[in-house]
Image: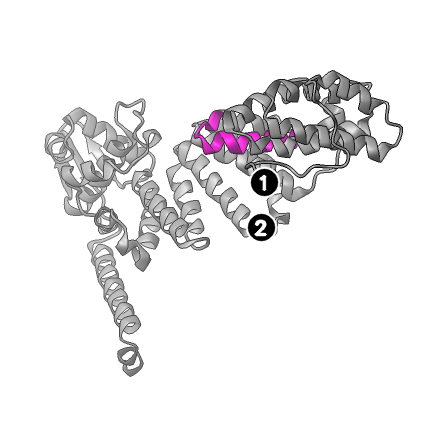
Amino acid sequence: RGNKGARHTSRYEVNMSGGDIAQAFAAISGVSDHQEKNDKYKALLDQILAKRAVGDLQKFIEHMVDEKTPLFVSRTLLQHLATSIFELPPAMTKSVATFALDKIQPRAVAFEDQLSVIREKLAALYESEGDYKEACEQLVAIPIDTGSRQVDADYKTTIYVKVATLALLIGNTELANTYLTRASGLIFKCNKPALVFQYKKCFAQVIDMNRQFLKAANHYYSNSQNGPDEERKQALTFAVQCTILAEAGPERSRMLATLYKDERSQSLEHFTVLEKMYLERVLSADEVKKFEKALLPHQLTKLPDGFTVLQRAVIEHNLLSASKLYKNISFDELGRLLGIPADRAEQVAAHMIAEQRMQGSIDQLDRLINFETGASEVLLWDSHIARACHQVNGILELLAHKYPAYGKAN
């Protein structure tokens, strides 16, 4: 009784001195009292678990799923087994759990609760071992929408969001999107802030992995307003990264302004890149290379035009910056400025002008790009003054925050 893992002896304990589990089954089957029968089966299962006898556990499972065993007994005992086997060593647990799933599956309708418990716990075990693919497959197989059992909205949402989280870890964006869509109709009923936050986090990641960077940036920024401190900082970092990777244009400029004006951004590693983007300054090759190291594989994918996402974003940004500095520029000079061949520079400029993300025209005879600065130079001058005033205002706000007495006096 003093041995580690020893179980309390029940008055219903079954004699297995001969080691023949079939005799034990026969003896218990003959018991007429339902409660006594149930207690004897439980005592037998506890004995087998204490001995860690995998072979006997398998025989017990087979006996429970046999149609001759009453459902009121088999459901109760398989539920007990579903939780108890996860106290065994991991390798043994996986072996028994997998065997149980195979044997129970043909009668899945009768044992949906038991299957769900085993798959949930098995998924958690696989996840703890870093096997996200297997963990995801176990959760996907949980019977949720069969209509034969009542499952509350929180449980459904938890499973859907967990599947989406694991799917993203293995790079299966399509599966993640499918389960987030299922969760979307339930999440508004959820009263678990952590679960809602995880849903929003996964949703932003799916958009990010689909390379809709500006839309992803908006969702990440929204997420950076709530949740744990570390999660908020990570969301803000991702918002900055996605904004930098987004196509140059007015919408991106507005997002850059929002992020730049958020004082939290100043503590981020790549604030310098954000600042140069916002102030429309040309990025150097070294700055781009350092920023590139922080990106994820899908953010470095090569596009049909041969550029990576980052290369295209930087080229378009530097081209927009050039449009603020020059009235016109030759193809060759622009190519040198952007670090690409002259004909590629012309193509990028033509594409941006066609999409109205940059104002200008192309003179192919003189091999020049003419930039349009707006209705007049006065408007351009006004925009520079407005930007300077905004920066001064930001400095005053920081001073007032750091020195309250100064803020009250002024």
Of residues 28 and 393, the one drawn nearer to the viewer in this rendering = 28
Q: Are marks 1 and 2 in contact (CB under 8 Å)?
A: yes
Task: Say which element carries label 1.
Answer: helix
Residue in the image at 24% along x and 30% along y: 348
Circle count: 2
Q: Main secondary structure of the magenta part?
A: helix
Magenta-tinted stretch? 112-133
Picture coordinates of residue 42 (x, y %)? 73, 32
State yes or no: residue 132 in magenta: yes
Residue in the image at 60% along x and 45% along y: 187
Q: Earlier in the sequence, mark 1 or mark 2?
A: 1
Picture coordinates of residue 47 (x, y %)? 66, 29
Q: Residues within 10 Å of mark 1 (few under 14, many from 20)?
A: some
Residues at marks 1 and 2, CA–CA distance in whole angstroms: 10 Å
Q: Is residue 70 left or right of residue 171?
A: right
Is residue 144 in view from this perspective? no
Find disc 2 in the rendering and name its residue. 192
Find disc 1 in the rendering and name its residue. 158
On screen, 272 above or below 74? below
Picture coordinates of residue 192 (x, y %)? 58, 50
State yes or no: residue 309 in magenta: no
Amino acid type shown at disc 1: Thr
Query: Which image quarter is the C terminus in?
Result: bottom left
Picture coordinates of residue 365 (x, y %)? 15, 27
Amino acid type shown at disc 2: Lys
Is residue 179 in view from this perspective? yes
Q: Is residue 320 left or right of residue 127?
A: left
Res 389 → quadrant: bottom left
On screen, 315 above or below 378? above
Task: Say which element carries label 2.
Answer: loop
Res 290 → quadrant: top left
Of residues 396 and 73, the one drawn nearer to the viewer in this rendering = 73
